[in-house]
Image (tube, grey):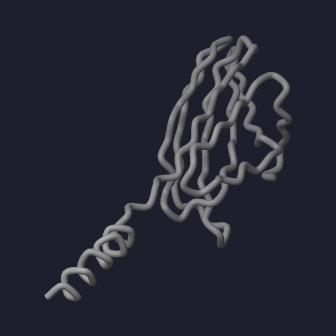
Amino acid sequence: MKKTLLLLILALPIVFTSCKKEKDTTYSVTFNMPFEVSITAFIFEYNKAGEIVKNNTVDVPSKGVITKDYTANKNSEKLKVQITMSSGGYSLTEWVQQVFYLKIGKENFITLDGNTLIGPSEP
């Protein structure tokens, strides 16, 4: 009886450890745009195979700072951002020339501002 009780006590931590919930991967994107244009940002989440598994759209006020928080898809490993800038009836779509790799199970922080490199081709 004592041996059974001892084994049960020793086994409980193992059972509870194996039931531990995996922490979500989250990311915050801060837009600090100094331009007098309307911006729509498209955030694409990619898996290991390079497939888009989720996307989000953000409308950024002209000359404003906005932060958006997201929970990544469980298969997401990296992010790419495409922005469309509009002013006076003209619009221009560009890619942020950086791939943002997610730290799985952690919080990730991304800042896009006037110094962010953009270009016409996907990074």
What x and y, as percent, mark residue 64? 63, 13
- Between 36 and 12, the one nearer to me in the picture: 12
111 with respect to 73 (left or right): right
- Which residue is at the front of the view, 72 or 3? 3
Q: Position of residue 110 (x, y in %)?
A: 68, 36
Q: Is residue 80 above or below residue 66?
A: below
Q: Relative to residue 39, is residue 73 depicted above or below?
A: below
Image position of 121 (left or right of 38): right
At 31% across and 79% down in the image, what residue appears?
11
Q: Residue at x 20, y 87 (%)?
A: 4
Residue drawn at x 80%, y 46% as measured from the top left: 98
- How far across and how far down the image is residue 83, in percent? 69, 35
**Does residue 102 appear to the left or right of 21 in the view shown?**
right
Q: Is 52 situated left or right of 119 in this image? A: left
Q: How many marks?
A: 0
Tell me: residue 105, above or below residue 88: below
Residue occupying image coordinates x 57% and y 49%: 106
- Give the percent coordinates (x, y) of residue 54: 51, 55
Most distant residue in the front direction = 2
Q: Quadrant of the N terminus?
A: bottom left
**In this rendering, is residue 15 above or below 21?**
below
In terms of depth relative to the viewer, which is nearer, 88 or 7?
Answer: 7
Instruction: Identify the image quadrant of residue 112.
Output: top right
